[in-house]
Image: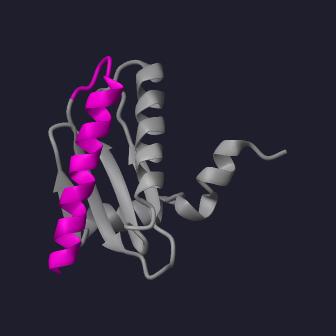
Amino acid sequence: MTSTGSRQFPRSHRLLEASQFKSLFDQPQWRASSQHFLLLVAENGLGPARLGIVIGKRRVKRAVDRNLLRRLMRESFRHRNAELAGLDIVILVRANLNNPDKVTINAELAKVWSKLLAKRAVD
């Protein structure tokens, strides 16, 4: 049984192991941040971009809000997947975000993706 979500965001596009997250936390090639998000990024030497998401319960109290943020982050990542090819990316929520607004979050994610792509273009 295959769900639509697994076809759109396959395992090959996810960071799954602690070691993958740890390498990005320890030595990211680039960082991009906004008011609520921090991106830690490194080249992965593979074809597809891979995404990891970290949302602490202290930052976002309600599970429904954390799940909404995950969905918005994954959707934003999918729209930029071609531009982000070859990167491992961890998105951290760095400020309290209770009752997130979809429009505001999408706009902020778009800005932080643009910052990242600009930094990557310079290097």
Which residue is located at x 44 percent, y 53 percent? 79
- Image height of 81 relative to 77, above or below: below
Which residue is located at x 51 percent, y 77 percent? 47
Q: Is residue 1 left or right of residue 33?
A: right
Residue 102 image point, x, y percent: 35, 27
> Looking at the image, can residue 122 be seen?
yes
Residue 110 image point, x, y percent: 28, 47
Which residue is located at x 28 percent, y 44 percent? 109
In what quadrant of the picture does the C terminus appear? bottom left
* Image quadrant where residue 122 sits: bottom left
Task: Please name whichever residue, 88 or 21, is drawn nearer the observer in this view of the structure.
Answer: 88
Task: Please name whichever residue, 14 or 16, is drawn nearer the observer in this view of the structure.
Answer: 14
- Image height of 49 relative to 123, above or below: above
Q: Farthest residue in the right direction?
A: 1
Residue 81 covered by magenta stretch = no
- Image height of 110 relative to 62, above or below: below
Q: Is residue 2 left or right of residue 76?
A: right
* Image quadrant where residue 59 sits: top left
- Image height of 18 relative to 93, above or below: below
Residue 55 image point, x, y percent: 37, 37
Start-end of magenta stretch: 96-123
Q: Is residue 8 left or right of residue 34?
A: right
Residue 20 image point, x, y percent: 44, 65
Q: Is residue 116 left or right of residue 89?
A: left
Residue 106 covered by magenta stretch = yes
